[in-house]
Structure formats: C-alpha cells, structure tokens
Image (cartoon, helix red, strand yellow):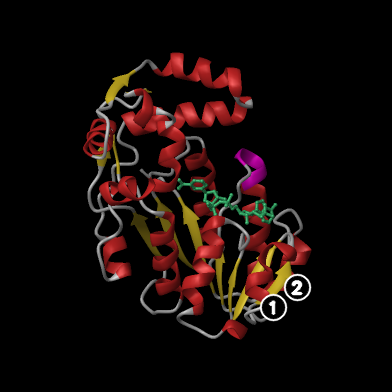
Amino acid sequence: MIAITGASGHLGKATLEFLLNKTSPESIVAIVRDPQKITEFSDKGVVVRQGDYDDQASYVSNLVDVDTLLLISSSALGDERVRQHSNVINAAKEAGVKHIFYTSAPNPSLDALFSPAIDHFRTEKLLIDSGLTYTIFRNNLYLDILPMVLGDAAQSGKLHYPAGAGKVSFVLRNDIAEALANALTSEGHDNKVYDIGAATAWSFGDIVASLSHNGKSVDYIDIPNDAYATELAKHLPAELATMLAGMAEGIKENDFNMSSPTLEQLLGRAPVSLDTYLKSVA
Ligand SMILES: NC(=O)c1ccc[n+]([C@@H]2O[C@H](COP(=O)([O-])OP(=O)(O)OC[C@H]3O[C@@H](n4cnc5c(N)ncnc54)[C@H](OP(=O)(O)O)[C@@H]3O)[C@@H](O)[C@H]2O)c1
C-alpha cells in the first residue's frame, strides 16, 4: 500500500489524481483530518483514513499495512510543524513502513532566511536519522503562489517587491504531484534528495517582462526588505509576515535558484514554464 498524508490539500489531491492513473485505488491510502473533504476519492475506491499530525497513536494504526508513505509537510510553522512531522515519522517506524517520501524546500538549513527551510532541515534530519529509506523532494516555490506575490501588478503596471536580481526555479504544483506519483510507483529513489524545480530560473525582472508580453507593460521596483516587512506586518499575523519577508530575502540571496534537471527526468517531459503559466492565468 502507498499512503499519502495531507491528502485533502492541493498537492495531496493532485498527487492522488496522478497516482490513480498508475495503480489501483484499493492500493492507495489517503490520510486526512476530515474524510468529508475527499469524498471524490473514497467514491473511486481509495482507502480513506482519519489522522491528525498531532496524534501519533492514530497515525500508527493508519499505517500498519503501508509500505511507502508520502509525508506532505504540514501547513503549521516552526516547532509545532517539526513536532508534527516527528510524530508521523515515529508512527511510520512503529507501524513498519519501509520508505518515506517527504516534501521539503530548497536549501534547508538552521540559518535559512526563509523560516520554513529551518523546519525542513530539522525534519530531513529526523527522517534520515530514523533509519527508514527516504526520498526527499526539495520542492521549489510554486508558480501557483505567484499571483499572490504579483497582486495587481498587471493592472497597475508596477510590481514592488524586495527580491533584487535573485532568481527562482518556480514549479507548478501539479508538476510536483505528477513527479511524486511517478517516483512513488517506480524504483531507484532510495535515500535520494531531489531539487524539484524548473531547469531555468527567473528573476522578478524576467517575471515582469513576461507579464508585459502578455498585456500592459509592468515595471519592477526593488524595494527595501524592511519596508516590505513593515507593510506586511500591518495586514498579516506576525509569524506569516516574517515568513513572507524572509522568503523575499531568500529569493534575493538566490536560495531558490536551483536549476536542476531532476524534475524533467522524473516527468519525462519539460515542466510547465513561467511564460506558459502566466499566459494561463492572465
Ligand atoms: N513550495 C511552495 O511554494 C509551498 C507553498 C505553500 C505550502 N507549501 C508546503 O507544501 C505543503 C503542501 O502544499 P499544499 O499546497 O498542498 O498545501 P495545502 O493545500 O495548504 O495543504 C496542507 C495539507 O496539510 C494538512 N494538514 C495541516 N495540518 C495538519 C495536521 N495537524 N494533521 C494532518 N494534516 C494536516 C491539511 O489538512 P486539512 O485539509 O485538514 O487542513 C492539508 O491537507 C504545505 O502544507 C506546506 O508545507 C509549499
């Protein structure tokens, strides 16, 4: 059996869709907090079980017949998130799971500017130290979050963002899901760490150029990070504001500039590019 946690989220649902093209629904276990959120998959015969990352015991019983587990990282942040991931890894070990796939981020480290990369560093260590076979997908920033960063730039003609000339190997969430489904159902991924992103990287100058090809001309205005952080803090919870300001700082320092061929190899085709994505959401 292959189990997927976070199966009610965007990445989890997309991975389930791709997995259903590769294996029978009865061999897939989708673990969610609320089974009502994925009735479209239980209707197709996928085994749906209820589990919360905060409850290690429920996870052990959910995983007893599972060989391979995809642990989709939690949407919590900091110590809470690492504790949740630790619960799932411990439960998997206790239940006899052989192989864990984990969704991480580029350049995880204890002094990362992008705070989630600190959580991912700590989780990767827990996973490797567990002695279980692992495959780590260091997923780059989703193309799907770009509209949130761009705001009304396409209409106003101005994008204010503190990323300098830093580049990002943006990746479509659906491409990650397809690559995960391919890897979960094939051999050769034992104890591998994959940088998952486009084989090209784009700066915010490239992004506004692409937006300009698609319509009105847009200027990129590189602003100081502290001004951005102050503005975010007026509108968002402190932890989220700090995370987003740190993400921009990390982009400026090229922490998301990976340009690896791995995703293309896992997909057997070129990933969706920035231009194609921006045209599709224009
Ligand atoms: N690379 C990027 O740009 C990027 C962007 C955003 C997030 N991420 C990371 O990638 C992960 C997957 O992305 P996504 O787009 O699928 O995020 P998402 O749509 O927010 O899904 C998050 C999933 O985590 C589940 N979850 C959260 N807390 C849980 C808990 N205590 N116990 C069990 N399940 C829990 C959610 O369950 P419920 O449905 O019950 O809430 C949901 O299924 C995110 O969780 C985050 O760690 C990456």
Quarter of the image with the N terminus is bottom right
- The residue pinned by badge 1 equals 64
Residue underneath mark 2: 61
Pointer 2: residues within 10 angstroms few (<14), some, or many (20+)?
A: some
The residue located at (42%, 58%) in the rendering is 137
Q: Quadrant of the C terminus?
A: top left
Q: Mark 2 falls on what kind of element? A: helix
Residue type beneath disc 2: Ser
Residue 119 as seen in the image, left or right of residue 266: right
Residue drawn at (51%, 71%), measured in percent from left and top?
17
Residue 226 picture quarter: top left
Q: What percent of the width, then of the height, locates residue 31? A: 67, 67
How many numbered discs sit on the rendered protein? 2
Classify 168 as above or below 132.
above
Kindly check if marks 1 and 2 are in contact, taking CB atoms under 8 A apart as contact. Answer: yes
Taking the image as shown, residue 18 lies to the left or right of residue 167, namely right
| Amino acid at pointer 1 | Val
**Mark drawn on residue 264:** none
Q: What SS does tag 1 mark?
A: loop
Lateral position of residue 21 relative to residue 82, left or right = left
Q: Position of residue 138 (x, y in %)?
A: 41, 53
The x, y position of residue 242, in whole percent, is 54, 26
Q: Residue at x 59, y 56 (%)?
A: 9
Task: Answer whether residue 188 is magenta in the image.
Answer: no
Depth order, front residue of 67/280: 280
